[in-house]
Amino acid sequence: MALGSSQVQQRFENPREILGDRLREGSIYRPLADHGHEMFPNDYFANCYTDSAKGRPTIPARVMATVMVLQAFEGFSDREACDRLEVDLRWQADGGVDTGCVAFHPTALVGQRTCVRSTPSIVEPCRWSDATDLRWVVLRLINETARHAGHADATRELLEGITGE
């Protein structure tokens, strides 16, 4: 199975450039678009597949992680999240894909959540500081933004693999 990786060079249909300052400071979209490649490097989910005979999906980690984060933030189903990746420039900028991208099948989200839940830890050293892990950075980013939108519990549950009753 091929290893998914992010694009190194964007085409002229780069949604981040198209949106410019319309990706406002303080929104969840701005830091994901500007720093998504640092938060979710290509090997971000690698420890989920170390013992897998099938390898890992060809979907780049940044795209998958971004869709999972925004899906939880906006409260979308798997199908709605994949549809949003195809049509929303903010989601495309955050995922590091070009405009007009074709989204992956919604069942890929189910498989990725299963892998994350079955992994003892997805903690990786943060590229900005050895004392901070990527999971903490992502949770902090989501919590600061989602606190006002009322979706913080759904996001925490998605990333921790639990559901509230």
Image (cartoon, rainbow, N blue to C red):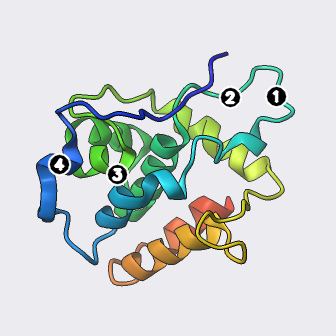
Marks 2 and 1: CB-CB under 8 Å?
yes
**Front residue (pair 68, 61):** 61
The image's mark for residue 17 is 4
Q: Residues within 10 Å of mark 3 (few under 14, many from 20)?
A: many
Labels 1 and 3: the sequence-earlier one: 1
Labels 1 and 4: the sequence-earlier one: 4
Q: Residues within 10 Å of mark 4 (few under 14, many from 20)?
A: few
Q: Look at discs 4 and 2 and give the one toward the viewer.
A: 4
Q: Look at discs 4 and 3 and give the one toward the viewer.
A: 4
Vertical arrangement, residue 136 with respect to residue 91, above or below: below
Q: CA distance from mark 2 to mark 3?
A: 22 Å
Q: Amino acid at mark 4?
A: Glu
Judging by the rendered image, the residue that carries numbered circle 1 is 52
Q: Is residue 104 left or right of residue 86?
A: right
Kindly identify the residue that appears in the image at 67 percent across and 15 percent down. 1
Kindly identify the residue that appears in the image at 37 percent across and 52 percent down. 76
Q: Is residue 111 left or right of residue 23?
A: right
Q: Name the element at disc 1.
A: loop
* Residue 72: % across, % down: 45, 60
Residue 109 in sight from this viewpoint: yes
Question: Residue 160 is drawn in which quadrant?
Answer: bottom right
Q: CA distance from mark 1 to mark 3?
A: 28 Å
Q: CA distance from mark 2 to mark 1?
A: 8 Å
Q: CA distance from mark 4 to mark 2?
A: 31 Å
Marks 2 and 3: CB-CB under 8 Å?
no
Labels 4 and 2: the sequence-earlier one: 4
Q: Amino acid at mark 3?
A: Asp
Q: CA distance from mark 4 to mark 3?
A: 12 Å
The image's mark for residue 56 is 2
Q: Amino acid at mark 1?
A: Ser
The image's mark for residue 94 is 3
